Amino acid sequence: MRTIIGSLLIVAALAAVAATAWAGNPWLDHFGR
């Protein structure tokens, strides 16, 4: 079960990074768009 929790944490972290990029963070702008 520890693996499932770890996977969820990784997905949540990636989602947070993606949301930050799409919000217009200048250093991620060229990745998101």
Image: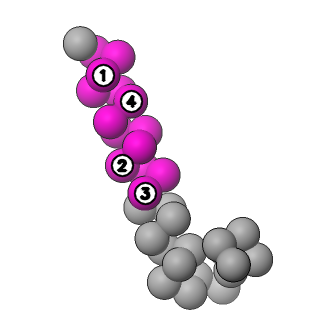
Look at the picture and state if 15 lies above or below 9.
below
Residue in the image at 35% along x and 17% along y: 3
Q: Earlier in the sequence, mark 1 or mark 3?
A: 1
Taking the magenta stretch, the answer to whether it contains residue 31 is: no
Start-end of magenta stretch: 2-15
Few, some or many residues within 10 Å of mark 3 (<14, 14–19, 20+): few
Query: Label 1, on which residue?
Result: 4
Work out how far the residue at label 3 is from the one at label 4, CA to CA, in angstroms: 12 Å
Residue 30, placed above or below residue 18: below
Local SS, label 2: helix
User: Looking at numbered disc 2 in the image, what kind of residue is underneath it?
Assistant: Ala
Residue 29 falls left or right of residue 19: right
Tag shown at residue 12 = 2
Identity, as a three-letter code, of the amino acid under mark 3? Ala
Distance (Cα) linking label 1 and label 2:
12 Å
Residue at the image position 28 percent from the left and 15 percent from the top:
2
| Residue at mark 3 | 15
What is the residue that sits farthest to the top in this orientation? 1
Q: Earlier in the sequence, mark 3 or mark 4?
A: 4
In x, y percent, where is residue 25? 58, 82
Quadrant where the N terminus sits is top left
Instruction: Please tell me which residue lies in front, 32 or 26.
Output: 32
Evaluate whether residue 2 shows in this view. Answer: yes
| Residue 3 belongs to the span the image colors magenta | yes
The residue lying at 43 percent from left, 39 percent from top is 10
Please report contact status of discs 2 and 4: CB closer than 8 Å, yes or no: no
From mark 2 to mark 3, how far is it between C-alphas? 5 Å
Give the spatial CA distance, label 2 vs label 4: 9 Å
Q: Quadrant of the C terminus?
A: bottom right
Mark 2 vs mark 4: which is more N-terminal? 4
Toward which corner of the image does residue 19 lie, by quadrant?
A: bottom left
Residue highlighted by disc 4: 7
